[in-house]
Image: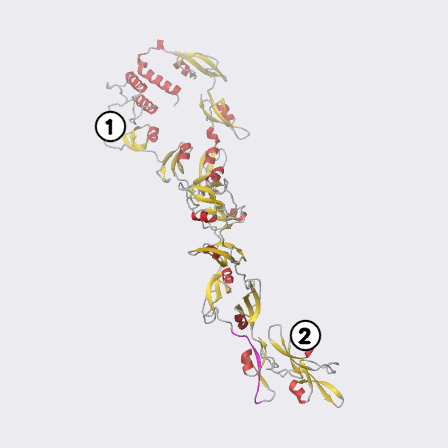
């Protein structure tokens, strides 16, 4: 209710109370606006005459002027073509014609008159990870990191769709390191990252590289039954220990490192009952030799002709000269012929006179030994062993050599070389045998760490020993370099100095130039021979800590210095702090009751943002519930057809029902709504007249007219008193 209406009510009340005393001759006059033929005419008349003529009375004592009968004007909020809002003074009809929002008669344009039109739906993330829609200004929406839907938009069921789930994503930084950020799965894939799953947080181990796979490794161990032991190692660890890796995920068992069974093949064994006959069985080469058989090779199978006697060209002398016949070797011998070898065929030159031939034992590509009939020269070319002119191949003529493999032996220079030897030959040279059939490769025999002279301080002084650099450091010695030998002057004290960083009694670090020995004695860090002290020689590394940075996908945590964190507008959690779950969560979040166009709403935010939105902060850690932002209620006395009744209501609801509010927290009791014979009988004289109005107004001006008993004297008391005064106390 504006002041003009309030004054008119006061005037009307005054007229009621004193109207009986006024005579018609004393009636007041004023400007009266009368509409006739579409025009408005102003005439000074008494109020009753003005009403009788259908006019609008402008008040006692008013006179006709230029604007007295003009239609009322007020602030009108119009939307501009550019999407903004402007305020102009118009009549209500003019404002409606321009599709504006009329703010009321006599209202003026101010900075916030049309501010309500610059609000719209804003989608903000809740503490539980969902989204909620709140009507805010664009700036307020940005402060809450929300998504603004546009001026004038309202919250609907589809205004703020649920965002896709997020989780930890391991992406590679420009420096080549893996960092963890919380993204959606699609965002993670766009950055070529590894998504750890919905809802996963970032921690120190989220993006740590997985350990290498492991499996069974057979390493050589002296004194064991098989000469090996089975350990679960990675492939690299197995190679370092010169082991045989069985594959990722393989377990150790009793047979994992057992030597493989010897290969088998077809073996043709002579039959005692059938001269020249034989039978075929599958045996190892050694078993075949024990039974005086002919071994057909590893992996060969018994077939119909596996043990058929081999045939070849046989040069037999006849009456017509030397002829060639394909026979077995025994058949050829029976005819006193010259056998040209198994599988040979008769050709024009096969029986020509040539150098004498004989059995030759040669090594095959598989490492076995086979017998072929060659000349002595041909046998030498193939690096074979010639058994003599006229000798024939037999099962025992060319015994198989012992098995060989890679052997790692130390050379005279101290390095390790790989040679192919038998196991016995390798043992004679104090080498490490890699197994039958193994070959020499780049990693078969890794080189040992180089050794050199090492000067070690003992009770007897400084002694020199030849060890590796690592072994020298373990014994607290000074390594003179790879390949150096112990000599007379190798461990002599050298007057070498350099920068030494030592900690003082105050805890600071200072730089002094001294010898390495004195630096170590002072528990210092020697920077090297001939180094000097400078500003950065002994500078301590900057302290690191967790830094919370705002990114497009949300808040991420990185480890950096306080200076670097503040340069990037981050929140530094302190030296030594770590990026862990919850480190970047706000520390002072709670329920906040904010007044919006729809009433009072509850949102989860910080204390500062709640105050910035003129809200009421309910306390750190509080949550939004059904009654978090409910207004206090109290006893409200209402007049009904049956009399006065008491109900529990808020102050605003009580005023809307023209009730009398007894105060926040008051309860309805038997005498709550009992009152004086008439509450607006302000002077307590038992009657209701102008004197009660004057007495109330005097107390109201002095601030002592709490009519509704709410503890304050304000316009609510004045309005409720006038309601009581005009209604009377019947």
Q: Secondary structure at mark 1?
A: loop
Give the spatial CA distance, label 1 vs label 2.
Answer: 137 Å
Residue 637, visible in the rendered structure: no
Report the quarter where the N terminus lies. Answer: top left
Question: Which is more toward the observer, 609 or 295?
Answer: 295
Question: Which is more toward the observer, 489 or 579?
Answer: 489
Task: Give percent across and percent down for residue 727.
Answer: 31, 23
Residue at the extreme bottom of the image, as rendered: 319
| Mark 1 vs mark 2: in front | 2
The disc at residue 292 is none
> With respect to residue 661, does 365 lie above or below?
below
Colouring style: secondary structure
Q: Dot 1 corresponds to which residue?
A: 674
Return the disc, 1 or 2, that comes first in the chain's sequence.
Answer: 2
> With respect to residue 490, does 682 lie above or below?
above
The residue positioned 57% from the left and 80% from the top of the image is: 267
> With respect to residue 251, does 157 lie above or below?
above
Question: Which is more toward the observer, 349 or 273?
Answer: 349
Tell me the magenta residue range.
261-273
Residue 406, visible in the rendered structure: yes
Membership of 540 in magenta stretch: no
Task: Give percent across and percent down for residue 211.
Answer: 48, 56
Task: Give percent across and percent down for residue 214.
Answer: 48, 61
Membership of 270 in magenta stretch: yes
Q: Residue 260 vs residue 649: left or right?
A: right
Q: Secondary structure at mark 2?
A: helix
> With respect to residue 383, does 241 lie above or below?
above
Q: Dot 2 corresponds to which residue?
A: 381
Question: Which is more toward the observer, 337 or 461?
Answer: 461
């Amino acid at each position: 209710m504006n002041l003009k209406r309030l004054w008119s009510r006061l005037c009307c009340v005054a007229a009621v109370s004193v109207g009986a005393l006024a005579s018609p001759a004393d009636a007041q006059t004023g400007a009266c606006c009368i509409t006739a033929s579409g025009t408005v005419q102003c005439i000074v008349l008494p109020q009753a005459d003005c009403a009788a003529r259908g006019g609008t009375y402008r008040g006692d004592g008013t006179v006709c002027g230029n604007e007295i009968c003009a239609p009322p004007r007020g602030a009108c909020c119009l939307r501009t073509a550019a999407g903004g809002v402007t305020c102009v003074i118009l009549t209500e009809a003019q404002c409606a014609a321009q599709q504006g929002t009329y703010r009321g008669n006599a209202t003026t344009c101010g900075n916030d008159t049309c501010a309500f039109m610059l609000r719209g739906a804003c989608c903000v993330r809740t503490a539980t990870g969902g989204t909620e829609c709140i009507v805010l200004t664009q700036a307020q929406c940005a402060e809450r990191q929300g998504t603004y839907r546009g001026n004038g938009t309202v919250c609907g069921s589809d205004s703020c769709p649920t965002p896709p789930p997020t989780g930890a994503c391991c992406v590679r930084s420009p420096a080549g390191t893996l960092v963890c950020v919380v993204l959606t799965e699609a965002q993670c894939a766009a950055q070529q990252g590894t998504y750890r799953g919905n809802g996963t947080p970032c921690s120190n181990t989220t993006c740590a590289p997985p350990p290498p796979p492991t499996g069974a490794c057979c390493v050589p161990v002296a004194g064991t039954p098989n000469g090996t032991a089975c350990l679960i190692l990675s492939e690299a660890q197995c190679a370092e220990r010169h082991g045989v890796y069985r594959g990722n995920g393989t377990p150790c068992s009793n047979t994992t490192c057992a030597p493989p069974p010897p290969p088998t093949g077809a073996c043709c064994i002579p039959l005692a009952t059938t001269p020249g006959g034989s039978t075929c069985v599958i045996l190892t080469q050694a078993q075949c030799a024990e039974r005086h058989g002919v071994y057909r090779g590893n992996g060969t199978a018994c077939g119909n002709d596996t043990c058929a006697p081999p045939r070849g060209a046989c040069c037999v002398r006849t009456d017509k000269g030397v002829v060639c016949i394909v026979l077995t070797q025994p058949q050829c011998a029976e005819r006193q012929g010259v056998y040209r070898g198994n599988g040979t065929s008769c050709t024009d030159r096969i029986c020509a006179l040539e150098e004498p031939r004989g059995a030759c034992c040669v090594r095959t590509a598989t490492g076995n030994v086979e017998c072929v009939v060659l000349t002595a020269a041909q046998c030498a070319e193939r690096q074979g062993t010639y058994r003599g002119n006229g000798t024939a191949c037999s099962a025992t003529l060319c015994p198989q050599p012992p098995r060989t493999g890679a052997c790692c032996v130390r050379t005279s220079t101290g390095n390790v070389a790989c040679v192919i030897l038998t196991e016995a030959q390798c043992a004679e040279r104090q080498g490490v045998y890699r197994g039958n059939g193994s070959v020499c490769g780049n990693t078969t025999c890794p080189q040992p760490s180089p050794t050199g002279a090492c000067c070690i301080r003992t009770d007897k002084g400084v002694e020199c020993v030849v060890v590796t650099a690592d072994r020298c450091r373990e014994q607290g010695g000074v390594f003179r370099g790879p390949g150096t030998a112990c000599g007379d002057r190798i461990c002599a004290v050298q007057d070498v100095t350099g920068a030494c960083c030592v900690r003082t009694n105050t805890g600071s670090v200072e730089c002094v130039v001294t010898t390495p020995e004195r630096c170590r004695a002072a528990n210092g860090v020697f920077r090297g021979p001939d180094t000097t002290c400078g500003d950065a020689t002994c500078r301590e590394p900057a302290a690191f800590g967790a830094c919370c940075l705002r990114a497009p996908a949300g808040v991420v945590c990185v480890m950096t210095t306080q200076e670097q964190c503040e340069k990037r507008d981050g929140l530094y959690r302190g030296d030594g702090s770590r990026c862990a779950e919850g480190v970047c969560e706000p520390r002072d979040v709670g329920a906040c009751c904010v007044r919006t166009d729809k009433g009072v709403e509850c949102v989860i935010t910080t204390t500062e943002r709640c105050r910035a939105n003129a809200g009421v902060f309910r306390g750190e850690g509080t949550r939004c519930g059904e009654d978090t932002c409910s207004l206090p209620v109290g006893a409200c006395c209402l007049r009904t057809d049956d009399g006065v009744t008491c109900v529990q209501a808020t102050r605003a609801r009580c005023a809307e029902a023209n009730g009398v509010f007894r105060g926040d927290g008051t309860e309805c009791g038997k005498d709550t709504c009992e009152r004086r014979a008439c509450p607006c009988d302000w002077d307590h004289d038992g009657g209701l007249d102008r004197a009660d109005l004057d007495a109330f107004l005097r107390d109201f001006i002095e601030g002592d007219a709490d009519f509704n008993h709410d503890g304050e004297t304000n316009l609510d008391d004045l309005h409720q008193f006038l309601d009581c005064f005009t209604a009377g106390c019947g």
